[in-house]
Each structure stands twice: as structure tokens, then as C-alpha cells.
């Protein structure tokens, strides 16, 4: 089993697609598990197609006790099909140490073992989120390999400072600095897994919640952008498709930067997941319903 961890927006799905393209994984019989912190699956639509079994868990953080039963059931289903490799993409607010305890359940410990935990780090935004969000730090601390992503967006001097910060958190994990998650062949297979000595967290992520929204009505672009501006300090991540009146487009908000590109697939309407913090969930839901349906 190979784990893909990393905070919201770091590029985990992009890395997963890269792994699926590499010979060392493409030539194996694979199962892929995708977890999102919300009930609407978005990342599953973004994963490249292939000859592998795909499982989605869209209830909460995979590394949280709240979805332990779902994850164990998924592993049991995978074990029954007998693939020789499982790739797991965890939600960005995951606590790495929880999954290690799940895999060590008596009825699973002889059927699965972790080959490597890959942590994707957003070179542009890591130092903005890590001081206040402990999961971002622990993901780096217990990684077997670090993928420092989006290096094309950072000045060389700032990149070297970040490498020093990451080395202070985890001095033993090999690091590869890349853009668009283009890790070199053999990087993953060269890693050695080191068990995490900390006990499982088994608690929901700190002050973080997710909300999902769907509508078939066209969304006014100005109202949507005004909403994001008003909540920019509370939204950690937004991802999905929005129909602004001329067909759905894929939108993604990471650290105040809104990106827009062609939608994946042909499903109509608006379907988005929002991860937010430091506000009441009911307040966020009311604001989005007003903007999307008003």
C-alpha cells in the first residue's frame, strides 16, 4: 500500500495521476482508494481512467475515527479481489497516524502492509497554513518521502528556505522538488516505510468542516465571486464544477487563488465541496445557498 497525503490543494490528485502513469505502478494490478472531506465525490472524476478498481469514501477524513468502519470495509472488499498494490489518496486534513492503526487491525495486518507514505507539500502555501493547522505539520513529520510540489511558483531562495523548514520537521525523508507532481521514476520504490510512534489521533480535524452544494440553476458569476471574497479567510478549499449559465466549468480555490478550467465529464449543473474553518457551518451553508440559488 502506498499512501498519498498532503494538505488541501497541494496536488495529491495530480500526484496520483502521475503514479498511475509510471511503469512501476502501471504494470501492477491496482486498487485505488480516494477519500474526500465531504459527501460529494469530486476527486474521483479527476483521476485518470485505467484498468484498476476505484473506491471512493466521501464521508470525512480517512485518517479520522469517523470513517474507520467505511475504510476497513473497503480494505476487506479490496482484499477479496486480490490486487498486488493499493494506492490511497487521503483528504487534505488527514492525520497520518490514524490510518497506520487501521491497517494494523488483527484481521488485516497480514493482508496489507504500507510500502511508503508520500506527503505532497505545496511550495507556495505550506508556510501559510502549517503554523495554524497541525495536520499539515504531522503529514510531513511522518512521511517516508516528501514531494515538494509547485516549485515553478516559488523563487529559488524561498524554495531553499522551505527545504530547510521541511528538513527540520522530518530530517530522514528523501525529498524531490517538482512541478505538476512530476516525480521521477523509481522515487517511490526507493523509499523505506518507518512506522509512526505516536498513538492515533482519532478525533475530527481541528475547527474544520466541509459542506457540499448542488443545483441545476445557473449561478451568477458576480454573486459567486462576491461570496468567495467575503469568506476568503474562512475557506480553506473549494473544488467542483459551476455552471455560470453557459455550461459547467471546473473551479478550484486554494489560498485565495481561484482557478477555472474545462469541466471533467458531461454532468450538468453545479456540484462543489467547500472545506472551511473558524465559522459556524450553518452560516456558511446559508451564504452559499443564497449565492447559488438566489
Image (tube, grey):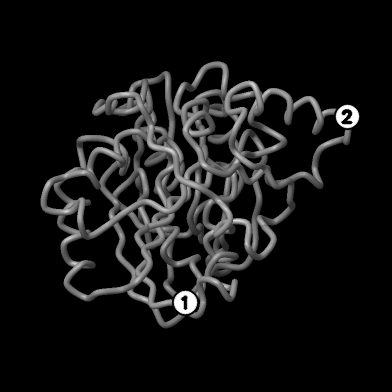
Quick check: 110 left or right of 261?
left
Frontmost of labels 1 and 2 is: 2
User: Dot 2 surroundings within 10 Å: few (below 14), some, or many (20 or more)?
Assistant: few
Quick check: 85 left or right of 180?
left
- Nearest the eye: 229 or 210: 210
- Nearest the eye: 23 or 268: 23
Total residue callouts: 2
Q: Residue 38: x and y, percent?
A: 33, 46
Quick check: 278 left or right of 119?
left
Quick one: which residue is furthest to the left in this view?
107
Q: Residue 45: x and y, percent?
A: 44, 67
How far apart marks 1 and 2 lie (CA) works out to 43 Å
The residue drawn where x is 29% and y is 35% is 98
Q: Secondary structure at mark 2?
A: helix
Residue 173 is drawn in which quadrant?
top right
The residue drawn where x is 36% and y is 37% is 210
The reply to whether callout 1 and callout 2 are in contact (CB within 8 Å) is: no
Circle nearer the N terminus (1, 2): 2
User: Dot 1 surroundings within 10 Å: few (below 14), some, or many (20 or more)?
Assistant: few
In this figure, which residue is indicated by the disc labeled 1? 266
Q: Quadrant of the N terminus?
A: bottom left
From what the image shows, is residue 277 above or below residue 14? above
The residue drawn where x is 62% and y is 67% is 262
In this figure, which residue is indicated by the disc labeled 2? 157
Q: Secondary structure at mark 1?
A: loop
Q: Quadrant of the C terminus?
A: top left
Q: Residue 30: x and y, percent?
A: 38, 72
Residue 41 is drawn in which quadrant?
bottom left
Quick check: 172 left or right of 210?
right
- Nearest the eye: 146 or 270: 146
Amino acid at each position: 500500500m502506498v499512501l498519498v497525503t498532503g494538505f488541501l490543494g497541494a496536488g495529491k490528485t495530480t500526484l496520483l495521476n502521475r503514479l498511475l502513469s509510471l511503469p512501476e505502478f502501471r504494470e501492477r494490478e491496482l486498487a485505488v482508494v480516494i477519500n474526500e472531506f465531504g459527501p460529494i465525490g469530486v476527486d474521483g472524476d479527476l483521476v485518470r481512467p485505467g484498468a484498476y478498481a476505484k473506491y471512493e469514501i466521501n464521508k470525512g477524513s480517512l485518517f479520522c475515527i469517523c470513517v474507520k468502519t467505511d475504510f476497513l470495509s473497503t480494505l476487506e472488499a479490496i482484499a477479496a479481489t486480490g490486487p498486488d498494490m493499493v494506492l490511497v489518496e487521503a483528504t487534505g486534513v488527514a492525520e497520518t497516524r490514524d490510518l497506520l492503526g487501521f491497517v494494523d487491525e488483527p484481521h488485516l495486518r497480514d493482508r496489507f502492509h504500507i510500502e511508503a507514505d508520500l506527503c505532497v507539500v505545496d511550495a507556495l502555501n505550506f508556510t501559510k497554513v502549517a503554523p495554524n493547522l497541525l495536520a499539515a505539520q504531522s503529514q510531513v513529520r511522518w512521511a517516508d518521502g516528501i514531494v515538494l510540489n509547485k516549485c515553478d511558483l516559488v523563487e529559488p531562495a524561498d524554495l531553499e528556505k522551505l527545504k530547510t523548514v521541511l528538513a527540520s520537521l522530518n530530517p530522514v525523508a528523501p525529498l524531490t522538488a517538482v512541478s505538476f507532481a512530476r516525480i521521477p521514476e523509481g522515487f517511490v520504490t526507493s523509499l523505506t516505510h518507518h512506522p509512526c510512534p505516536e498513538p492515533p489521533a482519532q478525533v475530527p480535524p481541528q475547527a474544520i468542516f466541509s459542506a457540499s452544494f448542488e443545483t441545476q440553476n445557473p449561478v451568477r458569476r458576480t454573486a459567486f465571486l462576491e461570496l468567495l471574497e467575503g469568506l476568503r479567510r474562512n475557506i480553506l478549499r473549494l473544488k467542483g464544477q459551476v455552471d455560470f449559465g453557459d455550461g459547467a466549468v471546473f473551479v478550484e480555490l486554494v489560498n485565495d487563488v481561484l482557478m477555472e478550467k474545462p469541466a471533467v465529464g458531461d454532468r450538468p449543473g453545479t456540484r462543489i465541496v467547500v472545506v472551511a474553518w473558524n465559522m459556524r457551518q450553518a452560516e456558511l451553508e446559508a451564504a452559499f445557498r443564497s449565492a447559488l440559488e438566489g
